[in-house]
Structure formats: structure tokens, C-alpha cells
Image: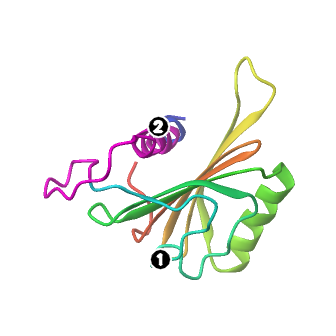
């Protein structure tokens, strides 16, 4: 449960950091969020993090890249539960294994939130899904630290 809450908190903080109208600044402080680069909306980003990953269904709402902290995060909208489940199956077919998965009914709402961590030994994916919304955190660590 604590890991799931941490995953959601990371994805939310990335989303909020990327929503700023402030232009990214190059800063040598590795703890700074000023190194985050917002990528083009509506287009699946093509970079070393997304290379060889299947493109998920839905529309890219927002994407972030932080070359200092070594991650890319992509947030999509307009996908169904079936499309999410199919995407997870495609990842497994391409060599990703689930290292952890947590689902929880969201209190006061009529849906389930799912957090999944996958790894293929080279890339790690931390995926958060609620109906219609998918967040993917991509790094080169074998398992994201939680």
C-alpha cells in the first residue's frame, strides 16, 4: 500500500511540475525540478527511454523528460480498461515482467486505481492507471526505487 501511494505521489508531482508555465532552466542542482523539459502534446515522444516500447492507446496529454534524473514520463488520456489491459499484455509479450502490482477501489468514486511496476532488465516502467488516464514513468533502473 505504501509503495502504491508513493507511485501515485511521484506521478502527481511530475504532472504538477510539468504544468508550470515557467520555461525549464538548466540547473546543476540534481534535486531541482527546473531540469524538466515538457515535450510536445499529442505525440508519443521518441527518445532513448521510449525507444522500442510499444505505443499505448490513447492520446498523449503531457510528456516530461529529465535528463539529469534520467527519466521520461508520459501521460495519456482517452483509453479504456480493455486497452490498458491489452497494453500490459503487449509489454509482457515484449519481455517485461511485472515486479509489483496494486489495485485499489477509490473511496467515494466508482472506479479502481491500478499501479504496476514492470522491468525487462534494461528499462523499468512504473505505470499508473485510472479509467481514461494512464501515466508511465520510464527509467533505465531495473526497478524504480520506492
The residue under the point 62% across, 73% down is 96
Q: Which x, y percent locates residue 71?
A: 40, 63
Of pointers 2 and 1, the one earlier in the residue sequence: 2
Q: Is residue 115 left or right of residue 140?
A: right
Q: State whether residue 91 is above or below residue 16.
A: below
The residue under the point 49% across, 39% down is 12
Q: Name the residue under label 1.
A: 47
Eye-nearest disc, 2 or 1 = 1
Instruction: Answer with the quarter of the image where residue 103 lies.
Output: top right
Q: Mark 2 points at which residue?
A: 9
Label 2 element class? helix
Q: Nearer the viewer, residue 72 or 116?
A: 72
Identify the mark at residue 132; answer none if there is no mark: none
Residues rendered magenta in the picture:
6-34
The residue under the point 79% across, 52% down is 79
- The question of residue 28 being in magenta is answered with yes
Q: Residue furthest top?
A: 108
Q: Which x, y percent locates residue 20?
A: 40, 40
The residue under the point 76% across, 42% down is 131
Q: Which of 87 and 21 is in front in this view?
A: 21
Amino acid at each position: 500500500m505504501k509503495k502504491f501511494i508513493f507511485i501515485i505521489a511521484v506521478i502527481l508531482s511530475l504532472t504538477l511540475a510539468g504544468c508550470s508555465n515557467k520555461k525549464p532552466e538548466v540547473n546543476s542542482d540534481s534535486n531541482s525540478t527546473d531540469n524538466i523539459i515538457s515535450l510536445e502534446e499529442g505525440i508519443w515522444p521518441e527518445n532513448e527511454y521510449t525507444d522500442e516500447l510499444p505505443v499505448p492507446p490513447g492520446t498523449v496529454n503531457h510528456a516530461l523528460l529529465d535528463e539529469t534524473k534520467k527519466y521520461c514520463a508520459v501521460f495519456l488520456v482517452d483509453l479504456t480498461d480493455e486497452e490498458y489491459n491489452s497494453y500490459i499484455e503487449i509489454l509482457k509479450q515484449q519481455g517485461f515482467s511485472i515486479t509489483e502490482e496494486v489495485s485499489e477501489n477509490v473511496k467515494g468514486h466508482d472506479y479502481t486505481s491500478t499501479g504496476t511496476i514492470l522491468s525487462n532488465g534494461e528499462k523499468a516502467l512504473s505505470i499508473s492507471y485510472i479509467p481514461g488516464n494512464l501515466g508511465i514513468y520510464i527509467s533505465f533502473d531495473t526497478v524504480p526505487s520506492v
